[in-house]
Image: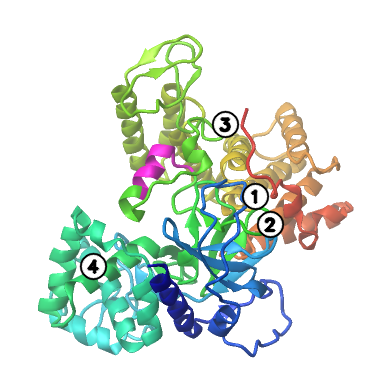
């Protein structure tokens, strides 16, 4: 069995040479030319491969002793990672040397881009979301942003096949659009596999869980809506199992990405597909300028698995477990999932109705929840119903309903406690809703609330997702913008400020960054912006962050302030934010 798997791993490495990988040194701010490697990607992998090499004991502060010490190994040391295989974990990547927080581990172009199944109407050529009715393809009738859209996703062969659906003269409602999106993904994967032997081999070796999926409702949907359509209506002579495999590959391995045109898509990036999951990750993926970038969010020791989060950071344990079991077909055993207190964050705990002490979830679902302080017992099914009701109410909130969000925050905090994950999601949604408005239209009370909420959420982020993460970067961005506006209003004595509020706000801003000794609030904000810029250097928001940094620097120069060396992006400010730490309790 192991010999057969070894052959398939080597076969995959051979096929991957058609996928263009960028060197980790290809950083965002670098403009120097790159030295070309004379060996192909697969040759670099295979030259050090040997079946006699056994993996050493993995060292990781994230998944201690959970990975086996034997397995197959193939290496590419100059990239900083190695590929391993074991029966329990399949193929996964580990570090071949110590990796520093903020260091790029690898970059790659996606093998395939397909529309999100449940997305709003979008152009199937460039995958841009349509904010209008758009137009229809003159041949097959699918939606396009314009008749001459330059997007290359909708090829001639796909167009010819889709024309057999008869969409050209038929209206498309919301359900039709979603079913079309569900069909286009596996169709594009199938056409790609037909055109390229390298892509076909890569897709065949990615995990699909098709055997499990075919027994579930998703398997019946694929059979009824996709397999039958591809075979009977489009006339493709392809086995049912192949289509089920491709659908499983997309659902299991695709990453949701934001494109340069603002559209949302699913991307298959082969190397990134081998990254294992942890709810306490040590790396993050970024998609910008057509490339998937994987970067260390904390320091990673040599021999540790490279781990990313397949779920949402602000979900509780049960919500994360439900998503992973239903969509990814496995159960997470990371430290956060195994800890009822979720690393001290209490995101799944509920406040006792008698004394407000945190009650942690029982080991067995639907068992009574016991308060460790007063001993009050609460029926487990009642708490589950309360959490479900909160999740439904959260889903109904709209970004323009600030009053509804504020009242929901008060209500959920009283019913579930300040630390519950639904409360954390409402806090973050409220910050985003306030900060998406023009700052001149935001009153001082809302600005102060943004500052307070981002501080709370930054403390939470340091606990459940430490290091140089996008969540921290986005929070820093909104916090810095809000604080800069507060300073501007206080200095000009305009708006709804008074001396006491002004003095208190400026004092809070100056003290918001404990590593900065300057008493100048602008100096503190410039430091925050520099850290934010460093974190988000591969994020689509980077240009806005750089503009914020430029404005703060101009303000300081206009005021005659002197910058310290810490307030420059090039000094790696991420080293000062606890990026090398695994997690810290909120308590």
Q: Secondary structure at mark 3?
A: loop
Sooner in the amino-acid sequence: mark 4 or mark 3: 4
* Percent position of residue 587, x then y: 63, 27
Q: Which residue is mark 4?
A: 244
Q: Secondary structure at mark 4?
A: helix
Determine whether, in the image, residue 446 is placed left or right of residue 146.
right
Q: Residue furthest top?
A: 374
Quadrant (top left, top right, bottom left, bottom right) of the N terminus: bottom left
The image quarter containing residue 90 is bottom left
**Which residue occupies the foreground of this view, 280 or 83?**
83
Residue 322 belongs to magenta span: yes
Q: Are marks 2 and 1 in contact (CB under 8 Å)?
A: yes
Q: How is the image coloured?
A: rainbow
Q: Which residues are magenta?
A: 314-324
Sooner in the amino-acid sequence: mark 2 or mark 3: 2
Q: Which residue is mark 1?
A: 467
Identify the disc placed on residue 344: 3
Mark 4 vs mark 3: in front: 4
- Vertical arrangement, residue 32 with respect to residue 519, above or below: below
Q: Are marks 2 and 3 in contact (CB under 8 Å)?
A: no
Q: Is residue 169 visible?
A: no
* Percent position of residue 516, x then y: 82, 44
Q: Which residue is mark 2?
A: 101
Sooner in the amino-acid sequence: mark 3 or mark 1: 3
Q: Are marks 4 and 3 in contact (CB under 8 Å)?
A: no
């Amino acid at each position: 069995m192991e010999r057969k798997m070894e052959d398939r791993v080597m076969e995959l490495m051979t096929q991957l040479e058609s996928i263009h990988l960028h060197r980790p040194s290809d950083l965002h701010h670098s403009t120097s030319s790159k030295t070309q490697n004379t060996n192909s990607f697969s040759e670099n992998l295979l030259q050090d491969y040997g079946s006699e090499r056994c993996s050493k004991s993995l060292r990781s502060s994230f998944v201690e002793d959970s990975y086996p010490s034997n397995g197959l190994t193939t290496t590419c040391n100059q990239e900083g990672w190695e590929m391993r295989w074991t029966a329990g974990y399949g193929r996964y990547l580990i570090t071949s040397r110590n990796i520093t927080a903020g260091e790029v581990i690898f970059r790659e172009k996606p093998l395939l881009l397909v529309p999100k199944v449940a997305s709003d109407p979008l152009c199937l050529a460039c995958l841009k979301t349509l904010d209008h009715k758009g137009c229809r393809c003159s041949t097959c009738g699918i939606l396009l942003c314009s008749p001459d859209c330059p997007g290359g996703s909708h090829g001639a062969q796909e167009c010819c096949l889709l024309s057999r659906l008869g969409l050209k003269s038929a209206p498309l409602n919301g359900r039709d659009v979603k079913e079309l999106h569900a069909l286009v993904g596996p169709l594009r994967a199938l056409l790609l596999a037909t055109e390229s032997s390298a892509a076909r081999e890569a897709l065949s070796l990615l995990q699909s869980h098709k055997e499990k999926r075919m027994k579930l409702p998703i398997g019946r949907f694929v059979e009824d809506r996709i397999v039958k359509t591809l075979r009977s209506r489009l006339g493709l002579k392809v086995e049912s199992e192949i289509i089920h495999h491709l659908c499983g590959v997309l659902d299991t391995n695709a990453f949701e990405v934001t494109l340069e045109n603002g559209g949302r898509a699913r991307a298959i990036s082969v190397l990134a597909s081998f990254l294992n999951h942890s709810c306490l990750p040590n790396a993050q993926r970024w998609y910008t300028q057509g490339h998937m970038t994987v970067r260390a969010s904390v320091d990673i020791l040599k021999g540790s698995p490279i781990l990313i989060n397949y779920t949402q950071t602000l979900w509780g344990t049960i919500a994360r477990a439900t998503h992973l079991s239903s969509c990814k077909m496995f159960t997470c055993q990371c430290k956060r999932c195994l800890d009822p207190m979720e690393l001290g964050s209490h995101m799944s705990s509920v406040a006792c109705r008698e004394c407000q002490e945190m009650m942690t979830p029982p080991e067995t679902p639907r068992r009574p929840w016991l308060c460790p302080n007063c001993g009050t017992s609460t029926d487990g099914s009642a708490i589950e119903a309360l959490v479900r009701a909160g999740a439904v109410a959260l889903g109904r909130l709209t970004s323009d309903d600030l009053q509804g969000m504020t009242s929901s925050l008060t209500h959920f905090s009283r019913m579930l406690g300040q630390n519950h994950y639904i409360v954390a999601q409402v806090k973050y949604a409220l910050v985003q809703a306030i900060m998406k408005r023009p700052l001149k239209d935001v009153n001082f009370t809302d600005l102060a609330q943004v500052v307070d909420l981002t501080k709370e959420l930054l403390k939470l982020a340091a606990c459940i997702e430490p290091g140089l993460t996008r969540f921290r970067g986005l929070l820093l961005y909104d916090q810095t913008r809000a604080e800069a506006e507060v300073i501007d209003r206080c200095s000009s004595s305009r708006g709804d400020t008074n001396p006491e509020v002004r003095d208190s706000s400026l004092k809070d801003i100056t003290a918001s960054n404990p590593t900065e000794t300057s008493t100048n609030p602008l100096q503190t904000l410039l430091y925050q912006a520099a850290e934010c810029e460093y974190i988000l250097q591969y994020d689509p928001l980077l240009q806005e962050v750089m503009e914020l940094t430029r404005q703060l620097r101009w303000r300081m120069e206009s005021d005659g302030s002197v910058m310290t060396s810490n307030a420059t992006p090039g000094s790696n400010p991420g080293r000062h934010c606890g990026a090398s730490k695994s997690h810290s309790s909120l308590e």
